[in-house]
Amino acid sequence: MKVLVTGSGGREHALAWKLAQSPRISEVLVAPGNAGTAREPEVTNFPLDPEENVRLVAFAFTEDVDLVVPGPEAPLVAGLVDHMERSGMPCFGPTAAAARLEGSKGFAKQVLDAAGAPTADYREFTDLEAALEHVDQRPAPMVVKADGLAAGKGVILAETRDQARAALRDMLEGDAFGEAGRRVLVEDFLQGEEASFIALVDGENVLPLASSQDHKARDDGDRGPNTGGMGACSPAPVLDAEVEARVMNEIMHPVVRVMRDNGTPFRGVLYAGLMIAPDGTPRVLEFNVRFGDPECQPLMMRLKTDLLDLIEKTLAGQLDQARPAWDSRTALGVVMASGGYPDSYAKGCSISGLDNAESSSVKVFHAGTAEKDGEVVTAGGRVLCVTALGDTLPAARDRSYAAVSEISFEGAFCRSDIGARALARLRE
Ligand code: AMP
Ligand code: GLY
């Protein structure tokens, strides 16, 4: 079989790497991929824009592809799966109508309400005056969110009412997030520990993948600005069996039923970003309709089952028959980023030490990298996700950081405390 993966990040490198291991896949095409996918056996990059849906459909047919696995959310929200399905091309993901769970935070809240699923209390506004009045009546801190896709930047954690007012003015009066910010949500600030609950959904059945945890803030101790994610580990001890059962019964099953009953069944990867309260109550912060990045990297390191089998069962509505096997070890990925990220940063810096860093239990997934004159250079904010397996969390962490220390490029930085929250919980 030939499989086309779309996207260019660490998540897509991990997906392409894992799919290429399937005995039933002869070639993985990546549009456009990065220097990591370019160097992977049985994987070929094609310089296509992953957001040009019509072109991707044409390309899939020209290349005689058997299955499309999209990485990022924007093309899904814009209807990539609808385009592919209309043309008869199997595509692993939700339709545009189902992808609204990520594409509109207001829509996600309506579905959560209809499902009776726990989430932060909120109000939705398009009118600035009404939103400002609401802020006057709420205790700080509070959270202001742009309704639409904003590449992870449309969420403002306002510690004071003034900060909330400024965020509302930026979105509703200014043009901070364009169309995405014309509608905003103001919601209560939730306390607790965040975790990622990533599941495959076939319209009806929900198959939870191994638990994982991201580190969204740039700096150690969860300080500094929010990023796409500075590292991840799997499993996440906060999602123990009891909490997982609650997430399935109180959130995943009811939400999937509401989507089905609305005539927009969800099929693909459903990722609930959760806040777990100190008493163990899980509440939904947001939905994503694709794998998390960087959570996907440790998950693919631990997945022993052929990913193609799981994707096929999702497409066939047979996830009730899937029994994925996971490596019992811990996987932990540390993101190496370009100085300046998440704001502006340099590109084109040469990266050294990549080959020394890898071993049978360490994989360096590329994100913002490119090849230039036979050399691997930086091409993005998040550059690499150095991922290791270990018998224990500290072993996986030490192995990842040892590999990180082999690699260098100008301005490189990473957090030094990936896995700290999971470790603290294990010590309890
Ligand atoms: P989101 O894109 O909605 O996941 O928001 C990005 C990040 O903002 C989350 O990963 C949380 O760290 C934080 N966040 C979002 N909503 C809330 C909330 N209601 N309370 C506390 N933190 C939040
Ligand atoms: N790691 C967070 C995300 O993929 O949205």
Image: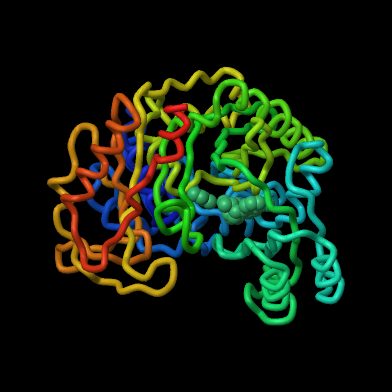
- Please provide percent x and percent y for residue 110: 81, 48
Query: What residue is rendered at 47% in x and 62% in y?
Result: 224
Foreground residue among 179 and 284: 284
Can you say whether 125 is above or below 405 in the image? below
Label total for image: 0
* Residue 139 in sight from this viewpoint: yes
Residue at point 55%, 37% (across, down) = 198
Quadrant, the N terminus: top left
Horizontally, is 64 left or right of 253 in the view? left
Q: Residue at x 39, y 57 (%)?
A: 8
Examine the rendered structure and indicate whether residue 282 appears above or below residue 94.
above
* Frontmost residue, 79 versus 224: 224
Rendered image quadrant of residue 200: top right
Q: Quadrant of residue 131?
A: bottom right
Residue 95 visible at all? no
Q: Where is residue 237 shown, x and y percent of the image?
A: 49, 29
Residue 287 appears left or right of 240: right
- Residue 202's x, y, as percent? 63, 32
